[in-house]
Image: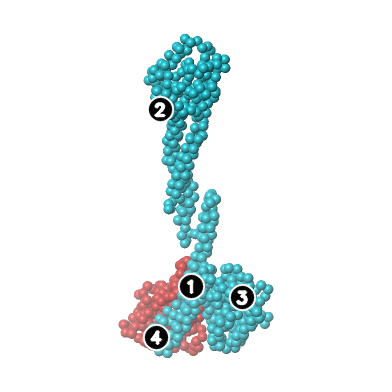
């Protein structure tokens, strides 16, 4: 899962990037509120974490402009305030959750996952598809009850596909959800990952739509 | 010692009124009333004598004898009358015994007289007017008048002891009535005092509703003149309390706010480290934790400085003569190691014969340290910081100039606000340094100016300390 962190404090931001990376999130960090155009080019974020106390444009301002531009990515607010007023205002302006500093990293992870789950319409953290099941929390994939090891990126790719069954996902979008801005990526990296997934999981329903992207067919009930 | 104003007034006013009135009544009865009564009785005596005198036209022997006989019967007649009209206080005998009259002929022989009347010495009879006499151990007052045609004397007498008894009786009656003054005045005093103490009750009621969340001033309208100054003073106290309290609240909120970010960072780093098996990575994370603890400590230190130099705190500590140059040198010696780390030169220049200022040493030390510490923090490596002390007019100027990024014009106003950071977050100050400087400066009635040098490199901060400093 790919997250955007808007946080002005360098130490905290670095700690979060590292901590969340260890929990298999891909985190991009910006140190101040950016104009909303910045986000319209980056549709691939699963969730945005905004610190309320940003120096130039306040976190609330960023949130408002996001929602005004119809960007509905889930948002978690970080606040250092003791009072809940700011949080209530943020929630009223489209934030989905808030955490007060200092927070528990595991709780933050749980809240991020819960929000993403709710967005994809699931109530359980594990995703089941035919004889396949993926548990994002335990970071495991099992086929017919047998655990199968997947490297981090292949796991993320599978998760993304499972969350969007029946939808065509473009190559660019998949790329964006797997790699940071500054990572050097082979042009055929996605193809390689898709190939591996098909081989390891025997995924016949994962189809290539030429010139557009990939589609995991909806499960026939 | 009576602690209640009401009881105090009741007791003391009661006694004062009581004793004063008893005293005055006794005086007035014995001296003034007695005079009035004497006059009154004297005039009755005079009128009676004159009336008697005018009723005697001739000195017919037979008539006189008859008259004398009737007089002898008066006692009996009076007794009869007494049964019907009941004279108060004195029995009829007393009345008879206390008064007498006699009519004497030219030779001083009694012609008509009260049966018990004493015999008067001739010299008294010969001189008309009032006489006080002691006859047979009884004090008498006599009035003697002389009939102008018949050459007879009419004498009226009254026992002085009777007169005194009358006066005493009146005094006693007055005193009896006076006894009523005590309870009545007590009740009146109680009511009056209660009424006049009502404003105090109201103030108490008003004050009772005050608490740290409700410190609005009390209404002065309709307050009595004597209580108004107290209310004014109390309102000022409430004002100061409110100010101090809101400063404290803001401070506590700011402190919590400012410490939460380093704490969040430390927690995140620690949790990341716990779940990490790589020793090298763990070491790196621990290093970062340690760095963030330092950062938190710096914030705590600055918060303590801020709280130490709040007006309420500084008001309590003493003022002393301060040699700014000595203080600057001392502070510089503490900060030199930090400067050396960045290879920064600190040049200090002090004008000759610098006058003293009066101020709080601890606060001024914090001010100087914050200014120079800021410069070291923000100035570029391998540059110089200039610290100058010189007098201008009635001020001593502390000038600190660095060669850092400077402060843009539009941000210069804001840098003195608490937790405002003009610079990139990478500088990691507490956001309190200049706010503390400003707080201390204003306590010493000092002005602060910021100036961007002509070369647009760095910033010059000047603090103008007035030489004649007022008490903060």
The residue indicated by pointer 3 is B356
The residue indicated by pointer 4 is B276
Q: CA distance from mark 2 to mark 4?
A: 120 Å
Nearer-N-terminus badge (4/3): 4
Q: Are marks 4 and 3 on the same chain?
A: yes
Local crowd at mark 4 within 10 Å, few (<14), some, or many (≥20)?
some
Q: Left or right: A159 with respect to B218?
A: left
Nearer-N-terminus badge (2/3): 2
Camera-side mark, 4 or 3 = 3
Colour assigned to chain B in the rendering is cyan
Q: Position of residue B436 (x, y in %)?
A: 55, 74
Instruction: Determine the image quadrant of residue A131.
Output: bottom left
Q: Nearer the viewer, residue B112 or B275?
A: B112
Q: Are marks 1 and 2 on the same chain?
A: yes
Q: CA distance from mark 4 to mark 3?
A: 59 Å
The residue indicated by pointer 2 is B89
């Amino acid at each position: 899962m790919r997250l955007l962190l808007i946080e002005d404090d360098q130490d905290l931001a670095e700690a979060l990037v590292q901590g969340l990376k260890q929990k298999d999130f891909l985190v991009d960090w910006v140190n101040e509120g950016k104009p909303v155009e910045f986000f319209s080019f980056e549709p691939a974020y699963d969730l945005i974490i905004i610190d309320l106390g940003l120096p130039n444009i306040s976190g609330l301002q960023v949130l408002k402009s996001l929602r005004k531009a119809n960007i509905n990515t889930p948002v978690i607010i970080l606040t250092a305030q003791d009072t809940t007023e700011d949080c209530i205002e943020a929630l009223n302006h489209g934030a989905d959750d808030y955490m007060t500093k200092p927070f528990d990293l595991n709780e933050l992870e749980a809240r991020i996952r819960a929000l993403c789950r709710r967005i994809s319409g699931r109530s359980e953290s594990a995703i089941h598809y035919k004889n396949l099941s993926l548990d994002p929390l335990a970071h495991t994939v099992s086929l017919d009850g047998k655990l199968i090891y997947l490297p981090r990126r292949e796991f993320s790719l599978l998760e993304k596909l499972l969350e969007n069954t029946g939808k065509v996902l473009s190559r660019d979008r998949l790329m964006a959800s797997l790699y940071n801005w500054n990572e050097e990526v082979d042009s055929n990296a996605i193809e390689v990952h898709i190939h591996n997934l098909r081989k390891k999981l025997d995924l016949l329903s994962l189809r290539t739509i030429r010139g557009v992207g990939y589609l995991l067919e909806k499960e026939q009930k | 010692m009576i602690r209640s104003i009401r009881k105090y007034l009741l007791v003391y006013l009661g006694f004062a009124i009581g004793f004063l009135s008893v005293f005055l009544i006794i005086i007035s009865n014995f001296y003034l009333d007695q005079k009035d009564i004497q006059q009154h009785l004297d005039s009755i005596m005079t009128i009676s004598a004159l009336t008697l005198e005018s009723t005697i036209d001739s000195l017919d022997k037979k008539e006189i004898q008859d008259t004398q006989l009737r007089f002898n019967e008066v006692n009996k007649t009076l007794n009869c009358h007494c049964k019907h009209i009941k004279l108060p206080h004195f029995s009829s005998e007393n009345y008879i015994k206390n008064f007498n009259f006699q009519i004497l002929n030219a030779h001083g022989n009694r012609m008509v007289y009260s049966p018990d009347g004493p015999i008067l010495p001739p010299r008294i009879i010969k001189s008309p007017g009032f006489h006080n006499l002691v006859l047979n151990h009884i004090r008498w007052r006599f009035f003697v008048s002389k009939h102008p045609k018949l050459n007879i004397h009419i004498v009226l007498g009254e026992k002085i002891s009777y007169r005194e008894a009358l006066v005493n009786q009146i005094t006693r009656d007055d005193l009896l009535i006076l006894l009523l003054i005590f309870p009545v005045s007590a009740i009146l005093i109680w009511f009056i005092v209660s009424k006049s103490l009502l404003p105090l009750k109201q103030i108490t009621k008003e004050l009772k509703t005050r608490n740290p969340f409700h410190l609005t001033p009390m209404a002065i309208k309709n307050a009595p003149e004597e209580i108004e100054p107290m209310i004014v003073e109390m309102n000022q106290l409430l004002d100061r309390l409110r100010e101090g309290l809101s400063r404290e609240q803001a401070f506590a909120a700011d402190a919590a706010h400012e410490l939460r970010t380093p704490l969040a960072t430390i927690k995140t780093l620690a949790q990341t480290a716990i779940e990490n098996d790589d020793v090298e990575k763990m070491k790196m994370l621990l290093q970062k934790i340690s760095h963030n603890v330092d950062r938190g400590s710096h914030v705590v230190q600055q918060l303590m400085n801020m709280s130490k130099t709040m007006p309420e705190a500084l008001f309590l500590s003493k003022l002393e003569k301060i040699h700014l140059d000595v203080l600057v040198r001392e502070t510089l010696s503490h900060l030199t190691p930090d400067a050396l780390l960045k290879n920064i030169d600190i040049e200090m220049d002090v004008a000759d014969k610098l006058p003293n200022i009066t101020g709080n040493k601890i606060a001024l030390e914090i001010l100087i340290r914050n200014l120079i510490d800021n410069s070291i923090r923000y100035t570029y490596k391998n540059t110089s910081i200039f610290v100058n002390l010189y007098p201008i007019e009635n001020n001593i100027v502390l000038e600190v100039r660095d060669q850092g990024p400077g402060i843009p014009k539009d941000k210069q106003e804001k840098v003195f606000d608490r937790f405002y950071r003009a610079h990139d977050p990478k500088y990691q100050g507490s956001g309190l340094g200049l706010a503390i400087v400003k707080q201390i400066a204003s306590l010493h009635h000092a002005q602060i100016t910021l100036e961007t040098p002509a070369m647009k490199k760095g910033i010059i901060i000047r603090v103008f300390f007035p030489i004649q400093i007022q008490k903060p």
